[in-house]
Image (tube, coloured by chain):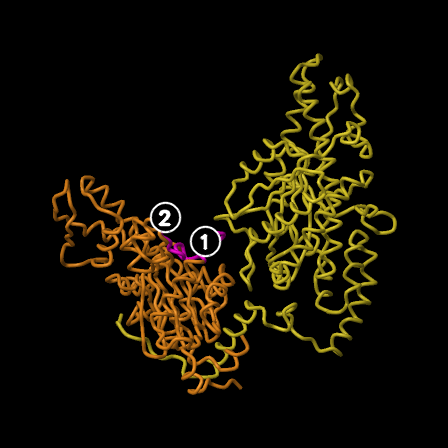
Amino acid sequence: MVKKSTTKTADEKLLVGIDLGTSRSAISADNKKKEWIESYVGWPKDFISRRVIGKPVLIGEEAVKHRLSLDMYRPLQNGVIKEGTARDEEAVQEMIRHLVELVKTEKGSKIRAVIGVPAESFKVNKIALRKAVSEFAEALFVVSEPFAVAYGVEALDNAMVIDIGAGTMDFCIMHGTIPSEEDQRTVITAGDYIDEQLFTFLKERYPDADFTMNMVHRFKEEHSFVGDIENEIKVEIPVNGKSTSHTITAEMKRACESILPAMVESTLELIAKFDPEYQDAIRTNILLAGGGSQIKGIGSYLEKALGEYGPSKVNIVGDPLFCGADGALELAREMPEEYWTEL
Amino acid sequence: MRMMKPERRCPNTGKKNEILYGIYEENRKLSGTSPQRKRPLLPKYNKSKSYGTFMVLLALFFVLVPAFPDLQHQQVTASSTFSNERILFIPWSEIIYGRQIDNNHIQLSSLLIAKEPQLEVSFDARNLLNYDFLFKNEYARIGNIFGLDIQTIVIDPGHGGKDPGAVGSILGAVEKDIVLDIGLQLRDLLVKSGRFKVLLTRETDQYVSLADRVDFANSNKADLFISLHINALSQKDYNVTETFYFGPPSNTYTLHLAEQENRGSKVLIEDFNNMIKKIGDVLKEQESATLAATIQHSLFANLVKYDRIIADNGTKIAPFVVLLGVDAPSVLVEVSCISKNEEEVNLNDPDYREKVSVSIEKGIINYLTQRDIQIAIGDENGKKKYNKNGRREVTGRY
């Protein structure tokens, strides 16, 4: 039978779990370090910006800050590495390099990595991803993101993970084995879609207000909700250069709720396809992960919608930012030694 | 709803081990470290059992085959490959008609190739010019009669950009990348001969609409147009190779044409134009059919070395937009089926793709050099014609 990896090996090699997200990427290492970055990579546009910035490449927050002098890449934007754009593959490499450097303590220590990627990317870019990462790791495993989450919280049997990310919303049914393609589904109405909707709704209601997508994104991060809330949401948006208070409650509700039909429908469809004897078990063990799980009221909304089909219970992961990376690290820890060496 | 970790449902380490092994297996396949890479998913069979099954099925085979003379060739191809008894469980009807069940466009094509109504006419503009023999005699190829030469070949790697085409299930190999690589290699091979100008509808991973592909071919005055695709079937165990070519115009169109031709007793300018167009259509169809046959022959001869149970679906007539729109003789090659796991591994291998390119090139060169090849045309049932020896008539001299 399979042997567990020994502590000795864990001492020699640095085990890391990486969650490569469309909007944010996180890393968890077994030296207890945890870091996250915005999933942006930027290269200086020309030699002038190269001199101003003083670095060949910027990553994460830093890249966002200097975005005007950079060619910006968000390599997993729609949940997949865009094929044929070498820069996107390079961007994935740079992101991983950066993440690994953030947690690495000694120079030259060997990295063993488990990387969780959006389900769609897992389907389409497996080979490209392996190639991109192989440079930094002695050995690596690529798994789908919702699966890494499920593994992390040990929701391995009769459970369903819904990972609401920026680019995609991934669904994955766990039934005690590695999920197949039929157990997974991806829809592209997720966090970014909410931003776009909110932007449009606000432009309609306040045509004079001057705001950017980035501001809209911030409003969402702070105030997103579905269902009903007690207090009105008010934000400051400049009008003709003067900061003015705007009420955006109705628009926020409409934008956030725009992802619900696809979510409920996909959940129901996936459950309906599953063995009828276990459908109740899955419906009562649903786990929301990803940034979108932080939308106020989304869990209870789903619970109520599913309640019409039978008993249902929806939980939300404790730490949406790191649950993927933690799950991947857990996998790395439990992966038998011979599996590492044979790859 | 609670904001906490869910109950730990899986204390069973056996289950975890199974999952870890699953991840290992999946990643091992991707990294290509497996010694059994060629056939990763075939289960092992009990030899003594399979021998018994084999004998029973062999007997059945001899009883049943005479009843289906049309299928004889397929059967013979497969019967030479008893290394794995799985092949004997493939229902022949599904091999032959698999695509028809699978793809709407094939069903459409069978409509199109249904016999067109023979119109009884008292006066036919054709009588004036007496070019009937061009249509009736399949050996008198218009291309030969007019001594037409091939200068520009346009290769059309299917899909691209936002349209990935078929995607394999184990490696995630994508049709658009595979056909682009085959297309680029094919171009290099053809250019080397120094005889032709070779153009690609796309040289990178970009999305090109069907209309743009057609325009590209026409505006560059293509003499031959070869569209490259990879197939995917819902029956994942089957692998087929087939080549399509531009078929006769749809019935409505033909009827319309006939109506115009038969109108009045004088030859109108319009009628004359139609006749000219018809000569063009026949030329295109004849040339396309020949090209399809040579490519298909060469391709199958090569692929069967790698997958002994691959089915040769021959050449078929189909109304693909690219084939209909391009003025030049045009074919659409469905190299093989990425839906079969072993074939996906093959297609992912650069050496294999090179072999595919070489065999398509060989088909094109054969077409250009062997102008007396016979043409095999699929009838409305998708069956193929066979000569007395049970050989497909598509066979030329190579």
Q: Position of residue B280 (x, y in %)?
A: 70, 28
- Report, in whole angstroms, how far the alpha carbon at label 2 lies from the one at label 1: 23 Å
Left or right of A2? Residue A305 is: left
Count neighbours of disc 2 (C-alpha within 10 A) and say few if under 14, some if 14 to 19, many if 20 or more. few
> Which residue is depicted at the point 34% across and 56% down?
A190
> Which residue is depicted at the point 77% across and 16% down?
B128
Q: Quadrant of residue A322?
A: bottom left
Left or right of B57? Residue A184 is: left
> Which residue is depicted at the point 54% across and 36% down?
B211
Left or right of B139? Residue A245 is: left
Q: Position of residue B103 (x, y in %)?
A: 60, 49
Q: Position of residue B36 (x, y in %)?
A: 64, 72
Q: Nearer the viewer, residue A42 or B307?
A: A42
Q: Is B323 drawn above or below residue A58 in the view shown?
A: above
The answer to whether residue A82 is magenta is: yes
Q: Quadrant of residue B98?
A: bottom right
Which mark sits nearer the N-terminus, 2 or 1? 2
Q: Quadrant of residue B134?
A: top right
- What kind of residue is marked 1? Lys
Residues shaded magenta = A71-89
User: What's the colour of chain B in the image?
Assistant: yellow
Identify the subunit bearing mark 1: A
Chain corresponding to orange in the figure: A
User: Residue A46 shows which numbered tag?
Assistant: 2
- What kind of residue is marked 2? Asp
- In this figure, which residue is indicated by the disc labeled 1? A82
Q: Position of residue B325 (x, y in %)?
A: 60, 34
